[in-house]
Image (spheres, rainbow, N blue to C red):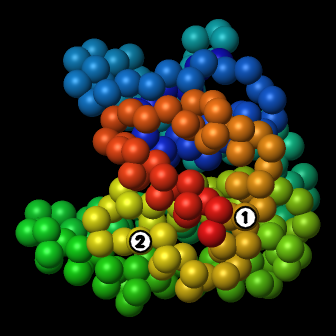
Amino acid sequence: MKLSYFSLAGKAEATRLMLDIGEIKYEDERFGFQEWKGGIKATAKWGTAPYLTLADGKQIGQSKAMGRYVAKMAGLYPEDALQAAFVDDIVDGIDEINAMVNGAGKGLEQAEKEAARFEEVTKGKVKAILDIVEADIKSLGDGAGHSVGSTLTFADIIIFTMTTNTFCGFFDGLSVDMLGGWPGIQSVNKTVSNHPAVRKYYDEGNGAKLGGMWTKEMHAAFISARDQ
């Protein structure tokens, strides 16, 4: 199978990590925005990325559907229906925080943009979402770095990818230190980041490759956010 997305973390990173955790072979196709507009977009099922192309050519073109499919293959999705619903609840609830942060500063001058984004994560909807996730980790997890139950799940992976990417320096006005306000989330992040496949991905594999809008400073901040 082939996973296709831009040269950044975004909505594909959770699926990339789960493929590696599950030791599932895949092609990690990454492209730039000009390549996307220049022809790749026309080959995507929904005209959006990321998308997963299967061996028979069929595509799964919605990121959460793609993530759930891979999570099940990788053993990261609960068999129990209620536990699976709790995982879905977190995945669906936290999914748009990057878009919310980006929207908060869109079209503003630099200082105003940074102030708007800071307010979004300290007083706005993003804070409210992260507070809910923090409460879920306390009530649904095991207190040892798992958000639902006592094993690694899709919910843990999405918490890790969404929060570290949001606070890694990719968005002006936000910093790694802000994650300290959610100790449960940080506990989950440590669990995920210490998985051998995840650490290898960022230290040696495709996650260590810089591309797109990433800079060396952003990548270093991402690693710092991961390991806080």
Secondary-structure class at tag 2: loop
Amino acid type of the residue that numbered disc 1 sits on in the rendered structure: Lys
Q: Judging from the image, what secondary structure is the residue with disc 1 in?
A: helix
Residue 138: image quadrant is bottom right
Question: What's the residue at 58%, 11% (across, down)?
Answer: 57
Work out whether 156 lies above or below 139.
above
Q: Residues within 10 Å of mark 2 (few under 14, many from 20)?
A: some
- Residue 37 visible, this angle: no
- Check the image and name the residue furthest to the bottom: 123
Residue 159 in the image: state x and y as whole percent. Answer: 62, 63
Kindly indicate the quadrant of the structure image that contains residue 227: bottom right
Which quadrant, please, contains the N terminus?
top right
- What residue do we see at 40% from left, 45% from top? 216
In this view, 33 is above or below 117: above
Q: Tell me which residue sits at (28%, 20%) in the image.
A: 35
- Classify residue 143 as left or right of residue 86: right
Total marks in image: 2
The amino acid pointed to by label 2 is Ser
Q: Which residue is mark 2?
A: 175
Residue 32 horizontal/vertical position (percent) = 31, 27
Q: Is residue 132 above or below residue 89?
A: below
According to the picture, the residue beneath numbered tag 1 turns out to be 190
